[in-house]
Image: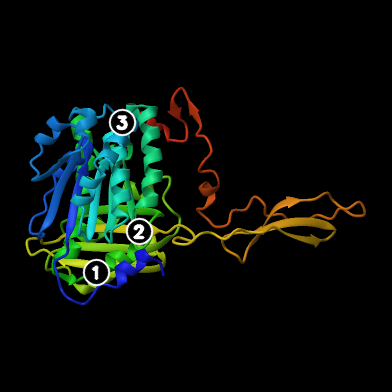
Amino acid sequence: MNKLTDTFYSRDGTSRDLKIKIIGIGGAGTNAVDGLKLDDLGDVRLAAINTDAQALNQSPLAEKLIIGRSITRGLGCGGELEIGKKVAESDRDALARMIADMDLIILVVGLGGGTGSAASQVLAQVASKTDALVLVFATLPFSFEGARRKKIAEESVGELRQLVHGLIPLPNDVLLQEGEEEDTSVLNAFAVADRWIGRGINSLCAMLLKTGLINQDFSSLSSVFKNRGGKTIFGTSTATGENYIQDALEDLFICPLLHLGDRPAKLDHILVNFIGGADLGISKVNEIMMKVGKRFGSREDIIFGAVIDESRNQSLELCILGKADMEGAGRPEPKQTPKKTVENGLQIETQISRDTRTPRPVHRSKISEKSSPKVDQDEFTFIENGGERGYFEKTDRNEYNNEDLDVPTYLRRGIKIKIK
């Protein structure tokens, strides 16, 4: 068992307060954390990191850190990733002090610029040397912000996923589809992402810190995110009124964040949290879990918690977090040696895939001169459903005139589609 897993399961039995810190990084991340409303959730600490001293001074948060003063003089990175990396590295010790002795660290960042994209990676590297569980809410640029910011964001997502236990991408193009107005302002568009982040963080903190109908503790959350890397799904829904159970489920199932292009086909772990009123009984919880489990069933297990909010009546908020671990997470992948066999006069060279039960032909020699029987081939069959993109992740995207043609037209053109 690796060191990381040990830290989650070797805590002593003594009771102590859970230490949670939520850190906004860069302008977008700080704005999102500034707007969080965490009422009655104990001692959750909020902090902000930025290179822009003027913007940081406007934040109401008590704990703030300006990084890279000697490099940028507090004037920001100007969207330059290389400057952001130098700035973050120059204050690595200060970043380490900010996250010392934490149990759960939640990073909130807007990717695509200089400060957020670079500082989040350095902070994640520092956090990886602690016992803390690290989760990231990362907003991705609108299409109209340009190909350069989009490329930086995509590369940052790939780097961060390797360093943290769970990364939740929030594409602004997708979130904008939730807006009601046909001509949503830019400020309102960014506020949509902040509301989604607020929902997720509130649900997580409520599950860990509030007394519930069905309580879940930090070890439950840790068991879902015990390995770094892999992909995370996240979705929320809310509903009120006479049919609030069915309405909340329908709202969850059409949540745009659960239908992103890189969503894993299978999940290893799922965590579902309910926040409802005193009328949320065990029978209703069971009804919801049956339907959620059928829709998002995982390979291994589903963990759920239910928090009772006395101020609610015929009201329900659902939050789902799912994790698909990387194959062979936590251990190096063994080097495979090709194996040659002869079948029906054909010499076939195979290699064993990650699922060692399934040989996959990768090369075929010339057909024997004596016969040419028809041979079944599965060289274009993928190992498992949903794994297709894994073979082509590093291929170039289909771009034309600085537009990624793999992105649906309605997202590239900013066309709003009613989804409910």
List the single residue furthest toward the bottom: 13
Between the C-alphas of marks 3 and 1, the distance is 50 Å
Residue at point 38% right, 30% down? 412
Position of the N terminus, as image quadrant, is bottom left
Q: Position of residue 255 (x, y in %)?
A: 31, 49
Q: CA distance from mark 3 to mark 2?
A: 34 Å
Q: Nearer the viewer, mark 3 or mark 1?
A: 3
Figure coloring: rainbow
Q: What kind of element bears circle 3?
A: helix
Q: Say which of marks 3 and 2 sits in front.
A: 3
Tell me where residue 78 appears, x and y as whole percent: 26, 26
Q: Which mark is residue 322?
A: 2
The residue depicted at 7 percent of the width and 59 percent of the height is 40
Residue pointed to by mark 1: 285
> Taking the image as drawn, is residue 319 in sight?
yes
As drawn, is 145 to the left or to the right of 13?
right
Q: Does residue 175 appear in the picture of this structure?
A: no
Residue 83 numbered tag? 3
Within 10 Å of the Cα at label 3, are there few (<14), some (14-19), or many (20+) other Cα atoms? some
Viewer-closest of 195 and 279: 195
Residue 19: x and y, percent?
Answer: 17, 61
- Label 2 element class: strand
Residue type at numbered disc 2: Gly
Neighbor class of circle 2 (other Cα within 10 Å; few <14, some 14-19, many 20+) is: many
Q: Which element carries disc 1, helix, strand or loop? A: helix
Q: First in sequence: mark 3 or mark 1?
A: 3
Is 26 in front, or is 88? 88
